[in-house]
Image (cartoon, rainbow, N blue to C red):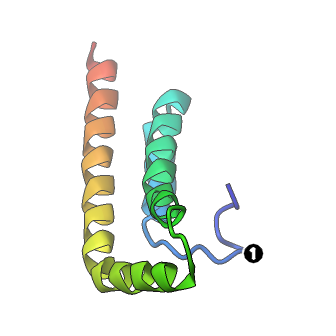
Amino acid sequence: MLGAGVFTRIPSITFYPLVILVVVLGDPFLGAAAVSLFGFARSVPLLAFGGARDGREFTRWTDEVTTWQPVAQLLNGLLLAGLAGWFATARLLAVVR
């Protein structure tokens, strides 16, 4: 983890809600699960680009991904919000029991 973005540039706005979620959850295991899922989701493009055989194919894939970037950002935010709700509910249910 690079830190909280004070001295580094964090290119994903969903990083900050993730940090807030981890703090609010107060459970290291739920926090680790949330961060792990976030990290895996951020690595998916790298796994996809790893199959490029040459520069032209990489450029074609980059152009395709750039076209879908707004959709990916929306899905990223929705997924993070859904996970936040799920983890918060799990935390609340654990407190009630």
Is 5 located above or below residue 34 in the figure?
below
Residue 60 x/y as whole percent: 41, 84
User: In the image, 96: left or right of 36?
Assistant: left
Residue at image location 26% in from the left, 19% down from the top: 96
Q: For mark 1, what is the residue?
A: 7
Question: Split into 4 quadrants, where in the image is the C terminus?
Answer: top left
User: In the image, 50: left or right of 64?
Assistant: right
Is 95 located above or below residue 2 in the figure?
above
Callout 1: SS = loop
Residue at image location 64% in from the left, 63% down from the top: 4
Is 29 located above or below residue 79 in the figure?
above
Kind of residue indicated by mark 1: Phe
Residue at image location 56% in from the left, 77% down from the top: 54
Taking depth in this image into account, of 13 and 44 the one nearest to the observer is 44
Question: Split into 4 quadrants, where in the image is the N terminus?
Answer: bottom right
Residue 55 x/y as whole percent: 57, 83
Q: From this viewpoint, which residue is outermost toward the front? A: 53
